[in-house]
């Protein structure tokens, strides 16, 4: 009988049930979308912050003090310590290897002569216009990686380079390729200010001189002009091997920039790992704090000093914490709005059934039976509506995610359960108050229409 | 004629009043839905305006976003300088407190350290980059360039010859705070005692920070600076405007935004304000939905009333007007109460998120009320079906 009553209520008045169900589904769809987007937003924003570039800097531990002003090291050439380039493959083997988005080593040398006199170019290498650069002077030459492919242990290839660690750099033309056929000149990229100053245009041939006089020549071709908005606008960037060859330090680098996805630092993260006990140390090293990633990197790169680039990391942490809080709050507000909307509509649907309740009571049904019946109906509606709403909400979340972040959030089961629970709780609460009042109804006046 | 229209009007409002008060339970439900919608809308709108503004301020955690440097390219000349007067020529920003700037002068000096002040033992002299700096107002360097203090404090004792050293300098010389440093540039020499050790994670770790006049004396460059770093708050467009204004004011120097930060800030700002706008839209849609559900019930319940009205000669337009006025009134009442509550809530939320209470914006109030009324009227869409009711069918109980 009970089941029949519930079923009848759905079958006899499909239109009204459909309306309430649709309202529920829509409300839950919106709640699902809000929840999915905000669950995902932390990760998305963390990735967005990687647009700031590297947040860790690795330098040789035993280095003498760099005399660096405006990005140029004024120490005599070949002074100071180096780190082996071969060790870099280990970075993708550490515990946090998935958090390491990109890294690029750099080797800067000063006092290279630049000359683009036409007659020095290999004949026939450039058909048509030949650029002559009547200049000879000091430049800062930086060797680095671009589009560098690394074979990982799991057989995958990891693509990294300076364009990944410094994503805000604009390149006109393209980045140099690290390997060129043996008969062609090496490729280099020139900073925009230097290019403007020396009147170097794309595809211009230039000659780099070695440290030992004019006899040591390295012909090169400008394949890109980079605009960085920083001191690098005055540099020439070249493949690592070329600069290593010029500087005479094979397989070595001076600085390593690492861009890692991190969790904002809190009080705990700022503690000195040496002062922690075993449990705390485990918790600390299992959270992707920038300091614990730095610690792990230091363990695989012997002789290296890993520093957090405070400017990037602290700023990121501060803003990420605030924004997360803000978004949770906003999601909370959206959920609250959904709950109130649904509560109100389920309350309305109970109120309008006063006559029915009166009739049931007149036929001898107890308040408990009536309440139970109506609750069962509401719950059934909540689960169906919640389920449909979840499906709709995932689509909505995709649209929103793609609109705002250019990537859709992953559907999550957690959200599904939260939504079903929310639907159930909200409809129950919404109908509880009118039901309580209904249980006190005297059947007679209601049936008389009073 | 006029008395008839007065009577008509009186009758109209009388019916509206009855419609509103006839079913208290439903009135309460609709008011609650509209009111809470208005509350949340007003709170979010207010928070959104405030958050966008405050977010641009939060970006100062990134430190400077523009640099004023000599025009000359490093490729042709030795590092040039800019006149110190450039420092004073920054155009004022709307919010004067929001402009932060620091001037730097770099030079290289031979440094000898006396680790223990009481003893004459000292380290060998090594060249180190000396950074003279000055900032305006009371702010310390960490407001311009974020760093982490390793040792000491950054309270500067006026008159005392203190200097702050980067972490690498401290390791290199093996010194701690209160050590004495002797700086010799070949032109001049200056001594100071270390008051703080700082870790920046950048080239600043290899520098010794001294007061500007010391650096200028060491370098032999009185009233000159190497560069100025500044933090301007605002949206990307505002920053661009500021840069061009500053460039106009000081044509002899180069003003350039630090793209690393301005670009990322612009992107993040866009994402977050997009999210906030989306949520406000969602909440409004939900409120509408809720009122829609309630109004559907109203429409169904009122078939009898409408049938009667029609039977005694009420036109469809007139009947629909009753319900629209009712909806608008409900929206007005719920909106006025809810929006006020929402603005109050948003100040509290602002405090929770940004640590500073959000300023109530008066414009939010009328906007939220108007939105609520619009939502209420639009959600009365189901009432349209009343127009099609045929009195005879209703009275026979067939419809």
Image (cartoon, rainbow, N blue to C red):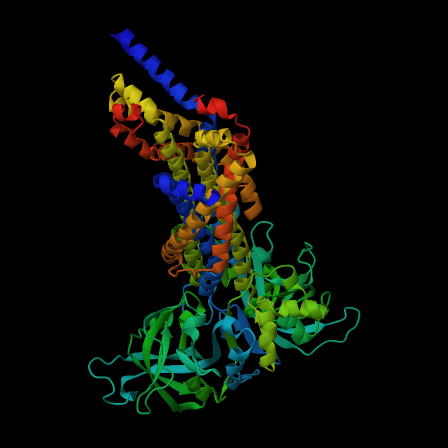
Q: Position of B360 compared to A123: left or right?
A: right
- x%, y% of residue B133? 57, 60
Q: Nearer the viewer, residue B169 or B184?
A: B169
- x%, y% of residue B237? 38, 51
Q: Is residue A124 visible?
A: yes
Image point (37%, 36%), residue name? B292
Q: Is residue B54 visible?
A: no
Question: Toward which corner of the image does residue B75 lie, by quadrant?
Answer: bottom left
Image point (39%, 60%), residue name? A408
- x%, y% of residue A346? 46, 38
Q: Is residue B51 above or below residue B214?
A: above
Image point (57%, 82%), residue name? A80
Q: Nearer the viewer, residue B251 or A99?
A: A99
Furthest-right residue in this view: B118
Q: Nearer the viewer, residue A342 or B157?
A: A342
Q: Is residue A69 above or below residue B14?
A: below
């Amino acid at each position: 009988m009970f089941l029949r009553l519930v079923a009848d209520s759905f079958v006899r008045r499909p239109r009204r049930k459909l309306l309430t169900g649709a309202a529920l589904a829509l409300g839950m769809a919106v709640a699902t979308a809000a929840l999915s987007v905000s669950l995902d937003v932390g990760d998305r924003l963390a990735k967005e912050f990687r647009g700031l570039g590297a947040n860790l800097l690795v330098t040789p531990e035993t280095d003498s003090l760099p005399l660096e002003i405006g990005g140029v090291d004024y120490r005599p050439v070949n002074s100071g310590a180096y780190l082996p380039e071969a060790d870099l493959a280990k970075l993708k083997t550490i515990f946090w290897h998935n958090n390491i988005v990109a890294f690029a080593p750099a080797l800067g040398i000063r006092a290279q002569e630049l000359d683009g006199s036409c007659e020095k170019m290999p004949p026939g290498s450039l058909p048509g216009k030949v650029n002559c650069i009547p200049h000879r002077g000091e430049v800062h030459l930086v060797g680095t990686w671009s589009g560098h492919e690394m074979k990982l242990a799991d057989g995958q290839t990891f693509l990294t380079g300076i364009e990944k660690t410094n994503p805000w750099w604009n390149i006109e033309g393209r980045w140099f390729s690290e390997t060129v056929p043996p008969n062609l000149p090496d490729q280099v990229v020139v900073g925009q200010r230097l290019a403007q100053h020396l009147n170097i245009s794309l595809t211009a041939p230039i000659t780099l001189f070695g440290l030992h006089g004019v006899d040591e020549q390295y012909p090169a071709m400008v394949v890109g002009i980079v605009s960085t908005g920083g001191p690098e606008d005055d540099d020439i960037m070249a493949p690592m091997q070329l600069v290593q060859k010029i500087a005479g330090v094979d397989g070595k680098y001076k600085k390593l920039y690492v861009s890692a996805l991190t969790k904002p630092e809190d009080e705990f993260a700022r503690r000195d790992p040496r002062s922690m006990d075993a449990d705390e140390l485990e918790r600390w090293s299992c959270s992707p704090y920038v300091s614990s990633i730095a610690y792990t990197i230091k363990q695989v790169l012997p002789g290296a000093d890993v520093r957090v680039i405070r400017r990037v990391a602290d700023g990121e942490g501060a803003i990420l914490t605030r924004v997360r809080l803000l978004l949770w709050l906003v999601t909370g507000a959206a959920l609250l709005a959904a709950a109130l909307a649904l509560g109100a509509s389920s309350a309305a649907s109970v109120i309008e059934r006063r006559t029915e309740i009166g009739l049931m009571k007149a036929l001898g049904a107890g308040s408990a039976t009536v309440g139970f019946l109506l609750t069962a109906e509401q719950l059934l509606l909540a689960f169906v509506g919640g389920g449909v709403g979840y499906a709709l909400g995932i689509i909505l979340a995709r649209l929103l995610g793609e609109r705002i972040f250019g990537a859709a959030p992953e559907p999550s089961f957690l959200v599904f359960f939260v939504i079903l629970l929310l639907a159930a709780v909200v409809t129950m609460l919404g109908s509880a108050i009118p039901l309580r009042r209904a249980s006190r109804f005297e059947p007679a006046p209601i049936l008389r229409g009073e | 004629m006029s008395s008839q229209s007065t009577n008509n009007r009186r009758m109209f409002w009388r019916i509206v009043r009855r419609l509103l008060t006839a079913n208290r339970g439903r009135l309460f439900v609709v008011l609650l839905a509209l009111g809470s919608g208005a509350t949340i809308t007003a709170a979010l709108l207010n928070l959104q305006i405030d958050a966008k503004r405050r977010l641009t301020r939060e970006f100062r955690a990134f430190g400077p976003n523009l640099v004023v440097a000599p025009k000359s390219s490093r490729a042709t000349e030795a590092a040039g300088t800019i006149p110190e007067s450039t420092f004073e020529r920054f155009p004022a920003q709307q919010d004067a407190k929001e402009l932060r700037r620091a001037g730097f002068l770099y030079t290289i000096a031979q440094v000898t350290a006396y680790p223990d002040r009481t003893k004459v033992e000292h380290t060998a002299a090594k060249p180190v980059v000396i950074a003279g700096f000055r900032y305006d107002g009371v702010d310390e360097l960490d407001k311009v360039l974020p760093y982490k203090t390793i040792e000491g404090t950054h309270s500067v004792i006026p008159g005392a010859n203190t200097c702050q050293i980067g972490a690498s300098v401290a390791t290199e010389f093996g010194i701690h705070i209160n050590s004495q440093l002797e700086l010799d540039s070949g032109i001049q020499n200056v001594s100071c005692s270390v008051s703080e050790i700082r870790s920046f994670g950048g080239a600043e770790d290899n520098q010794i920070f001294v007061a500007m006049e010391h650096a200028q004396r060491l370098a032999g460059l009185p009233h000159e600076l190497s560069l100025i770093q500044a933090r301007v708050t605002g949206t990307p467009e505002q920053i661009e405007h500021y840069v061009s204004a500053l460039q106009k004011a000081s044509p002899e120097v180069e003003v350039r935004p630090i793209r690393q930060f301005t670009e990322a800030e612009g992107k993040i700002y866009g994402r977050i304000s997009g999210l906030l706008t989306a949520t406000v839209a969602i909440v409004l849609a939900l409120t509408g939905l809720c009122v829609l559900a309630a109004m559907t019930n109203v429409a169904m319940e009122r078939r009898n009333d409408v049938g009667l009205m029609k039977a005694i000669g009420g036109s469809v337009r007139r009947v629909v007007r009753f319900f629209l006025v009712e909806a608008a009134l409900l929206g007005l009442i719920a909106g006025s109460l809810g929006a006020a509550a929402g603005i109050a809530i948003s100040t509290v939320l602002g405090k929770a998120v940004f640590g500073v209470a959000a300023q109530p914006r008066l414009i939010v109030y009328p906007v939220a009320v108007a939105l609520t009324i619009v939502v209420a009227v639009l959600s009365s869409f189901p009432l349209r079906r009343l127009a099609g009711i045929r009195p005879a069918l209703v009275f026979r109980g067939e419809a």
